[in-house]
Amino acid sequence: MEILDQISDFIQQGNMDEVARLTNSTIEQNISPQDIIDKGLVSGMGIIGEKFKNNEVFVPEMLIAARAMNKALEILEPEMINADIKSAGTLVIGSVEGDLHDIGKNLVGIMFKGAGFKIIDLGVDVSADRFIKTAKENTADFIGLSALLTTTMTNMEDTIKGLKAENLSIKVLVGGAPLTEKFAREIEADGYAPDAASAVGVARSLLTS
Amino acid sequence: MNGKERIMTALEIREADRVPLYIHGINEEPIIGIGRHLTDGLPEPKKFYQMNDQEKMKLLDTLFLIHDEFDVDGITSFEIAHEKELDEKHVTDDWNVMYTRSPHGLPVATGHPLKNAEDLKTYTPPEPKAEHLLLLNLARDRFKDNKACFWLMRGAYVLSWRLVGMENLMLKMFDDPEFVHQVANMTMEFNLKQLELLVQAGLDVLVIEDDIADKNSTIISPLQFQEFVNPYNRKLVDRAHDLGLKVVRHSDGNLWPILDLLIETGYDGLNPLEPQADMGMKKVKEYCGDKLCLLGNIDCVNLLPYGTEEEVDLAVKKTIEDGGKGGGLIICSSNSLHPGVKPENCIAMFEATRKYGQYELR
């Protein structure tokens, strides 16, 4: 559908005003919110996310794309409630205890939201208890743990141990500058992504496995 | 040769008597950990602001002692006493940026005074002050001309995002580019004035510290970097050269997308060359080792925290093999010596530089 392709294009350009105008048009044309999300927003965010992964666009372009997507979601919210739209999954995300850095974590949140997930962002310096409590309360599928520092990444293990102690099957994804796949395996994380753009793919493969 | 001569020779991309050694940044914990191999009476590891005056003096003296005992050829200084404590966890600097203290390293900017162009109308930037250069004065007094004095000056990007907020700054590059230019220009004016004070205080090497990349690429696009950041840093480079200083560019991360531009800007050196960010010594040396002195590359993410002393020794040997030929190499860790590094591995890095760094007698 041409209008959904246009929404996808304007998402990629970060043109919030055009995305808003066209999203309102789709509602007037009675196009289903699920189609608008899948073929407009998720499509646009998927394409720009891939370009980000290939270093063709950079963080500022991702931020304006996300801003345009958020505007569309805001307009669509009543329609989504009426149509009982389900998210692709729920992710509780945050920077681990002691870590005050957030740009990487925010990008991962953008990628997941752009893929149709529900995001609960707990911010920075988040304790293991708070991750687990929030994930339980929201029946989350995933907890995403971020760390920028060599000295804070060791706190990731606390959340994983806490989940095991409570016999919870919520999957844990880890990422951040100092992390390696080896470290992620050692702390028994379910998934590791080397960059924000790869994280959604890792989560999807865990959902289907 | 003394340390200063060694560093200046390397920055001119010539061979000194041996490969010089430099500490770009070091936290309290490694100063104390390494210092315990040299002196008694050090406090338990804690942050500088938690120390009493006697402990602070001891820490500073130990930092200088480490430079003396391990033949570190350059000493780093930076602004101090420009911050005010708000409460136990928060400080503000003289730009009115708020920082949250972290037990894991440097404070992180979390409160930003300039949200938009309207805020700028009523904002007065600080004036650089000679008393904030105390650390440089102390280092110069202690080492005279025997070691090169480095100064860490935050560049246009870091100062701008601290003032505006990182994500807000990026959005403003699209929404209000003039505002982004005005903020960057304001930071540059401050830095140019501070530069005059630094020269009077006897500085040798200016380090423009302006992190712009993560391990995959630059954070902003090369075009945005070219428009909003580099012109302002270039003026610092030019003025520093006019004043007879050498200039090193520091940025974490993968700098390949802007490396040609950095070379063209006229920097004398590049730091800290993170191996995890595709900035391995061999590759960078082959590409631009005849144009830029390379400072860094000894991995502080995995090797210095978790490796063995033998592995550190080998890494230094390899880095000298890959980067030492013809000069233009200064051994340094791939970023600060942070609270997670093993003191013994730092010592192994210092000793291996002496062991493998000798150029042939001339």
Image (cartoon, helix red, strand yellow):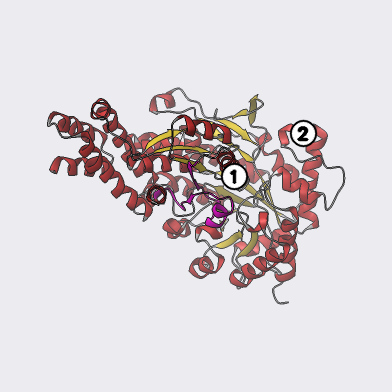
Query: Bounds of the magenta span?
Result: A169-197
Vertical relation: B287 (above or below) B243: below
- At mark 1, the secondary structure is helix
Q: Position of residue B24 (x, y in %)?
A: 64, 51
Residue assigned mark 1: A157
Closer to the camera in the image, A32 or B123: A32
Q: Amino acid at mark 2?
A: Met
Task: Judge the density around disc 1: few (<14), some (14-19), many (≥20) Cα neighbours within 10 Å.
Answer: some
Residue assigned mark 2: B51
Q: Are marks 2 and 1 in contact (CB under 8 Å)?
A: no
| Residue at 63% from the left image edge and 70% from the top image edge | B318
Q: Amino acid at mark 1?
A: Glu
Q: Which chain's residue wears label 1?
A: A
Task: Judge the density around disc 2: few (<14), some (14-19), many (≥20) Cα neighbours within 10 Å.
Answer: some
| Residue at 49% from the left image edge and 54% from the top image edge | B215
Residue A171 sits inside the magenta stretch: yes
| Residue at 48% from the left image edge and 34% from the top image edge | A135
Q: Position of residue B151 (x, y in %)?
A: 63, 47
Q: Position of residue A132 (x, y in %)?
A: 53, 34
Report the mark closest to the observer, 2 or 1: 1
Q: Position of residue B106 (x, y in %)?
A: 62, 40
Is B312 placed left or right of A208 in the picture?
A: right
Q: Which chain's residue wears label 2?
A: B
The Cα atoms of the two marked residues, 2 and 1, are separated by 31 Å
Residue B176 sits inside the magenta stretch: no
Q: Which mark is residue B212?
A: none
Vertical relation: B284 (above or below) B195: below
**Quarter that holds the N terminus of chain A:** top left
